């Protein structure tokens, strides 16, 4: 029988492909990576460490713990504007979004949320030297209000104050805070836990809290029930373990 070099070459090629696909010659099994979207200007939930620029925070540690528990080797963090998170989830660019994101009926139409893991209200902050006092939402009428685009704070102001205020929407809190410190806006409306951090770090104070009673959840693509169920069971386990109290103490000092 005559050998056919071309056929032998094809056979070897097919064999190599099969081995590569089975992971035998690629140096072991493929790493399982959970791609996590966040918006890293929301301390203490997610922010950039000032010394090394690394994204860290309560949410980042929480999702890393969850990912380990449900069989991922590591998380890959993708930082973006808050209002890009849901579109990125829908487009399949990220597997989950964790960003102090409030569970709302509106968002529930397009993504699924985990069980709640934190609570927040909306705080009204002003410059430390400001004489603005607020005793009800109506006192905000006539003011220039800064918010982060796409947030529940922005929605609240639009819904309850509408054309009675001048609303300035910023892509992130860094810009909103800057505008407040520069005097371009009178007040900023943002989540109370983050406002508390800003008070400690910058020349601002909280003059009023709107009791919105929000709950934060981890978002997944609509219908990704398998991942959602795993996240919920891991979240439950973590919340009932000493890890939870350690995490809370680390980021909230309690
Ligand atoms: N909790 C607010 C929201 O969901 C703000 C979140 C954020 O800015 N990261 O809209």
Image (cartoon, rainbow, N blue to C red):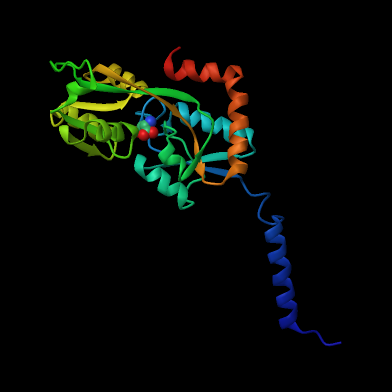
Q: Is residue 141 left or right of residue 95?
A: left
For this rendering, which residue is in front, 94 or 213? 213
Q: Position of residue 75 (x, y in %)?
A: 53, 39
For this rendering, which residue is in front, 148 or 27? 148
Q: Is residue 15 visible?
A: yes
Q: Residue at x 47, y 18 (%)?
A: 250
In the orientation shown, which residue stands out farthest toward the top?
254
Q: Residue at x 30, y 27 (%)?
A: 190
Quadrant where the C terminus sits is: top left
Q: Is residue 223 above or below residue 104?
A: below
Q: Position of residue 27 (x, y in %)?
A: 66, 51
Quadrant where the N terminus sits is: bottom right
In the orientation shown, which residue stands out farthest toward the bottom?
2
Please identify the quarter of the rendering in which residue 193 is found.
top left
Q: Is residue 203 above or below residue 47?
A: above
Q: Position of residue 246 (x, y in %)?
A: 53, 17
Q: Position of residue 208 (x, y in %)?
A: 26, 17
For this rendering, which residue is in front, 154 or 100? 154
Q: Is residue 52 visible?
A: no
For this rendering, which residue is in front, 161 or 15? 161
In the orientation shown, which residue stands out farthest toward the right?
1
Q: Is residue 151 left or right of residue 32?
A: left
């Amino acid at each position: 029988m005559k050998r056919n070099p071309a056929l032998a070459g094809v056979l070897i090629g097919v064999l190599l492909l099969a081995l590569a696909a089975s992971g035998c010659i690629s140096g072991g099994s493929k790493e399982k990576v959970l791609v996590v979207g966040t918006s890293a200007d929301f301390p203490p939930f997610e922010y950039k460490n000032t010394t090394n620029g690394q994204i860290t925070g309560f949410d980042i540690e929480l999702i890393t713990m969850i990912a380990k528990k449900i069989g991922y080797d590591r998380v890959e963090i993708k930082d973006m504007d808050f209002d890009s998170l849901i579109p990125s989830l829908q487009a399949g660019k990220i597997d989950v979004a964790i960003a102090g994101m409030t569970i709302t009926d509106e968002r529930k139409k397009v993504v699924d949320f985990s069980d709640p893991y934190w609570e927040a209200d909306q705080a009204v902050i002003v410059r430390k030297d400001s004489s603005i006092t607020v005793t009800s939402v109506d006192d905000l009428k006539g003011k220039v209000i800064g918010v982060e685009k796409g947030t529940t704070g922005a929605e609240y102001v639009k819904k309850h104050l509408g054309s009675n205020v001048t609303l300035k929407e910023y892509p992130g809190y860094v810009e909103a805070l800057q505008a407040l410190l520069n005097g371009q806006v009178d007040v900023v409306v943002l989540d109370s836990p983050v406002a508390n951090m800003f008070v400690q770090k910058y020349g601002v104070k909280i003059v009023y809290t709107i009791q919105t009673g929000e709950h934060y959840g981890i978002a997944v693509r609509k219908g990704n029930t398998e991942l959602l169920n795993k996240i919920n069971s891991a979240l439950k386990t973590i919340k009932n373990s000493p890890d939870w109290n350690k995490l809370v103490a680390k980021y909230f000092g309690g």
